[in-house]
């Protein structure tokens, strides 16, 4: 009996090793690369990851065609994964929405065959994005459509599609997507003035800059001493508050107000305070300034010698920036300004020695984000610091807020009447053009800069109903304009991971289908006979192993095996086939009932055959055990 069982087990091992395995789930694929991504730190999201594979080698070996239609990438669940073949020796890139802490995830790259796979092939931009030279055909006017498809990371501030001082479609980094037509003239700093108020008053006079004309943007910065809670300033009608920051412990408060001039301001304005206070002020005239100024405030009020205005992100990329510190100290002064910022005369309040002061510097920039750097003071002062952005005039903005990061189709349209923004086919906002149109200038188009879109499927520009630009990924250093207008794009390519803790490697690359190779002669290339050429066999006798479908533990076991470079079949198939035979033998030993014991082994094999695709080859050893027992005994109790 022991010798008989030994022969059975030996046969099972041989059967396990020789069982046919078909692991392809993509129709027509001839080859498959098994790829494992590993995360060595905390849970990571929205990661672009490279892996090394020679694109030119695949093309030369006919593993993929020149149009890249017979290549696709999927995760372990069989879902499409966005990927980009490497260009000119670069690594391939693919996108991982999420990978757990200190874990691994498996992916498959399928290639070959004549069937178009429809893989999620995409362009993964480098930090410089993609540029398209200025051309008359790409001047938008007031009748156009711009459509972009891909993954939008709304936690990143950057331009999706932009033509400087003309048009911008951008993410603000806080969950909003903004489309804007920018005025032809950038905002600039005009005249400035400061006010000195020596006395503690409830009504203060603030001098206006010279040369103010209707339409100019006016900015007033105010510092007051804060000795009681809740000082409220009341400006004349038409003025709007940018911020009001009361910091009692620092005995200093900062305020900023703005107004688009209507020409009625005069040489000065009167500001009322809810409580008598000392007040110092500065006033700016911004030419071509418009929209609503935005600011970020540092609320610490802490004493020190280096007031440092905080980083701020604006809604446009064409701004006058103000770095401001409101401070209090009769003995010390701000004498140094942030690098790149030009100072103006400080506003003062108090007598005989001014103790309430406001200092500011200005610059113009096309950056969305500014972090000015620190002021320097002659001694320790109490302060509140701010960074303010003033955008261009005549800016028309339509915003879709609460856009989650993910795959989207964004479309901006102008129909001579309204500017509209669509997200995934839904109109999110509309603003009247009121006669405005996109300025015609010589600036080039810049798209997908600053990693705002990890990957892009396509972008299209239509003017007056005619497609004038259409681009998507190509295996080239230039993306051809598919509209036929010759507006070819120059892309930059991502080649590194966006998270240093997440990496990926190819574990294996080989045949995806069961194949027969007929070498014929030494000079002839091997003929591949695919599954379609093999006579029909009961499908359950093929092995299509997908053990990750085993509830609870399948994926974890597969990940461990892949990380150890252990073929999954070597573990799973012996477990299933030997398991069925062992159950049959153990059942018979304790029950002496052959039929129920064999039935238990059959249930075991059918369960795993259906759930993880191990096939029904385990029925063969069960049949051998059953027949052997029947032949070994003259009488069997059934």
Image (cartoon, rainbow, N blue to C red):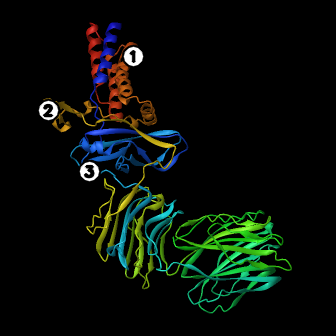
Instruction: First in sequence, mark 2 or 3: give its number.
Output: 3
Label 3 sits on residue: 69
Label 3 environment density (alpha carbons within 10 Å; few <14, some 14–19, many ≥20): some
The x, y position of residue 428, in whole percent, is 44, 71
| Residue toward you, 576 or 568 | 568
Name the side, left or right, on which 273 lies relative to 317. right
Residue placed under numbered mark 2 in the picture: 523
In front here: 7 or 156? 156
Identity of the residue drawn at 23% across and 42% down: 62
Q: Position of residue 565 (x, y in %)?
A: 41, 30
Q: Which mark sits nearer the N-terminus, 1 or 2?
A: 2
Callouts 1 and 2 close, C-beta under 8 Å:
no
Query: Mark 1, mark 2: which one is toward the viewer?
Result: 2
Placement of the N terminus among the 4 image quadrants: top left
User: Is residue 125 shown above or below 265?
Assistant: above
- Dot 1 falls on a residue whose secondary structure is helix
Q: How many badges with numbers are in the image?
A: 3
Q: Are marks 2 and 3 in contact (CB under 8 Å)?
A: no
Which structural element holds mark 3? Answer: loop
Q: Quadrant of the C terminus?
A: top left
The span from disc 1 to disc 3 (Cα, nearest Å) is 53 Å
Residue 169 coordinates in the image, percent (x, y): 44, 69
- Res 544 quadrant in image: top left
Q: How far is the residue under mark 1 from the one under mark 2?
A: 56 Å
User: Which secondary structure lies at badge 2?
Assistant: loop
- Left or right: residue 480 versus residue 559 is left
Residue 586 is tagged as 1
Q: Where residue 333 appears, x then y in whole percent?
A: 78, 71
Mark 2 vs mark 3, foreground winner is 2
């Amino acid at each position: 009996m022991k010798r008989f069982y030994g022969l059975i087990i030996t046969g099972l091992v041989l059967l396990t090793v020789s069982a046919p395995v078909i692991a392809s789930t993509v129709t027509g694929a001839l080859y498959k690369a098994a790829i494992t991504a590993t995360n060595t730190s905390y849970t990571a999201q929205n990661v672009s990851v490279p892996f090394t594979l020679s694109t030119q080698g695949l093309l030369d070996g006919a593993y993929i065609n020149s149009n890249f239609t017979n290549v696709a990438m999927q995760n372990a669940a069989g879902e499409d994964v966005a990927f980009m073949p490497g260009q000119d020796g670069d690594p391939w890139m693919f996108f991982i929405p999420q990978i757990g802490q200190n874990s691994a995830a498996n992916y498959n790259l399928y290639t070959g065959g004549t069937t178009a796979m429809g893989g999620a092939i995409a362009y993964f931009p480098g930090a410089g994005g993609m540029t398209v030279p200025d051309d008359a055909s790409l001047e938008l006017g007031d009748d156009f459509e711009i459509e972009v498809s891909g993954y939008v990371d709304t936690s990143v501030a950057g331009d999706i599609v932009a033509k400087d001082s003309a048009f911008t479609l951008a993410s603000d980094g806080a969950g909003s997507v903004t489309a804007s037509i920018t005025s032809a003239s950038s905002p600039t700093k005009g005249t400035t003035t400061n006010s000195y108020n020596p006395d503690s008053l409830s009504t203060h006079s603030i001098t206006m800059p010279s040369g103010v004309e209707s339409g100019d943007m006016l900015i007033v910065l105010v510092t007051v001493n804060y000795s009681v809670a809740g000082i409220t300033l009341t400006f004349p009608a038409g003025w709007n508050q940018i911020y009001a920051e009361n910091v009692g412990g620092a005995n200093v408060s900062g305020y900023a107000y703005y107004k688009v001039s209507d020409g009625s301001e005069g040489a000065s304005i009167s500001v009322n305070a809810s409580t008598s206070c000392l007040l110092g002020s500065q006033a700016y005239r911004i030419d071509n300034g418009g929209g609503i100024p935005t600011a970020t405030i540092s609320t610490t009020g802490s004493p020190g010698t280096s007031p440092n205005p905080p980083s701020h992100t604006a809604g446009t990329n064409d701004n006058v920036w103000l770095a401001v510190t409101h401070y209090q100290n009769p003995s010390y002064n701000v004498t140094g300004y942030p690098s790149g910022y030009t100072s103006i005369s400080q506003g003062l309040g108090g007598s005989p020695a001014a103790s309430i002061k406001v200092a500011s510097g200005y610059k113009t920039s096309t950056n969305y984000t500014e972090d000015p750097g620190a002021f320097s003071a002659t001694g320790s002062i109490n302060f509140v610091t701010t960074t303010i952005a003033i955008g261009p005039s005549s800016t028309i903005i339509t915003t879709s807020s609460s856009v989650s990061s993910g795959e989207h189709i964004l479309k901006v349209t102008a129909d001579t009447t309204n500017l509209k923004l669509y997200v995934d086919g839904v109109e999110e906002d509309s603003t009247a053009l009121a006669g405005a149109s996109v300025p015609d200038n010589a600036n080039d188009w810049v798209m997908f800069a600053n990693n705002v879109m990890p990957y892009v499927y396509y972008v299209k520009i239509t003017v007056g109903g005619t497609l004038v630009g259409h681009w998507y990924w190509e295996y080239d250093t230039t993306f051809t304009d598919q509209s036929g207008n010759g507006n070819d794009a120059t892309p930059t390519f991502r080649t590194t991971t966006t998270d240093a803790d997440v990496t990926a490697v190819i574990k294996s690359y080989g045949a995806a289908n069961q194949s027969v190779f007929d070498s014929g002669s030494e000079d002839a290339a091997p003929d591949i006979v695919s599954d379609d050429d093999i006579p029909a066999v009961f499908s359950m006798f093929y092995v299509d192993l997908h053990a990750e479908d085993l509830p609870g533990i399948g994926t974890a076991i597969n990940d461990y095996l892949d990380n150890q470079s252990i073929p999954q079949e070597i573990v799973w198939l012996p477990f299933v086939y030997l398991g069925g035979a062992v159950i049959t033998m153990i059942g018979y030993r304790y029950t002496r009932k052959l039929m129920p014991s064999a039935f238990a082994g059959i249930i075991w094999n059918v369960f795993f055959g259906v759930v993880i695709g191990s096939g029904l080859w385990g029925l063969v050893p069960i049949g051998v055990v059953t027949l052997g027992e029947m032949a070994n005994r003259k009488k069997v109790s059934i």
